[in-house]
Image (cartoon, helix red, strand yellow):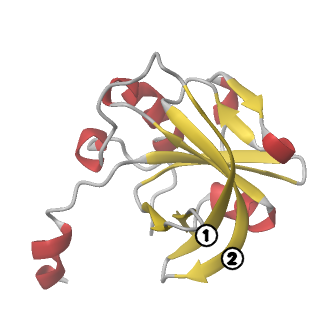
Amino acid sequence: MAGSDEFVGRLDPEMCVVTAAAGGERAGCLVGFSSQCSLQPVRFVVWLSEVNRTFRVAHSATFLAVHLLTREQRGLAEVFGGRTGDEEDKFQQVRWREGHAGSVIVCDAAAWFVGRILTRVDGGDHVGFVLDPVEWGGSAAHDGPLLRLGDAEGISPGHPVD
């Protein structure tokens, strides 16, 4: 994989928090793999690791919420990236509310949307959830530069990959 480092090592994608709710459970995690994948109609894909709790809840969900954070919101990123929902309820530590169809909205996110899951795509150790956005929102109070992978260095994964 050393050859891929020449390319992948130069990337510094935006991070986002993805939340899921299904079967009376809610979960959320910090995600480094996501992108708009269609212009018309607008579609977005988020890639969730198969080893974390958010993936397990998302597997049964109909909608996911995707939240952008700013660099100043590293503490919020640490809640969702540095802890596992298998051991604690992350939502006791953040302000959240119910959104479209029971989705979970993190209130302090800089921007967010709720998307209907259209399909799931196997991508190796991650699964892509292709989303059709149905609800949008955000907070003008958080309008700084977005949190990027480089800004999240040092956040040890709450559910590390073996």
The residues tagged by marks 2 and 1 sit, at their Cα atoms, a distance apart of 5 Å
Q: Which residue is mark 2?
A: 119
Quadrant in which the N terminus is drawn? bottom left
Q: Is residue 79 left or right of residue 19?
A: left
* Classed neighbour count for the residue bearing mark 2: other residues with Cα under 10 Å, few (<14), some (14–19), many (≥20): few
Which residue: 67% across, 37% down? 88
In this view of the protein, which residue sits in the foreground, 126 or 15? 15
The single residue placed furthest to the front in the displayed view is 40
Mark 2 and mark 1 in contact? Answer it, CB < 8 Å: yes
The single residue placed furthest to the right in the displayed view is 23
Q: Is residue 26 left or right of residue 95?
A: right
Quadrant in the picture for residue 133: bottom right
The secondary element bearing badge 1 is classed as: strand
Which residue: 68% across, 35% down? 105
Q: Is residue 56 left or right of residue 159?
A: right
The secondary element bearing badge 2 is classed as: strand
For residue 85, say whether it is visible: no
Residue 63 percent coordinates (x, y):
75, 56
Q: Would you place residue 76 above or below residue 9 in this image? A: above
Q: Which residue is mark 1?
A: 130
In this view of the protein, which residue sits in the foreground, 38 or 66? 38
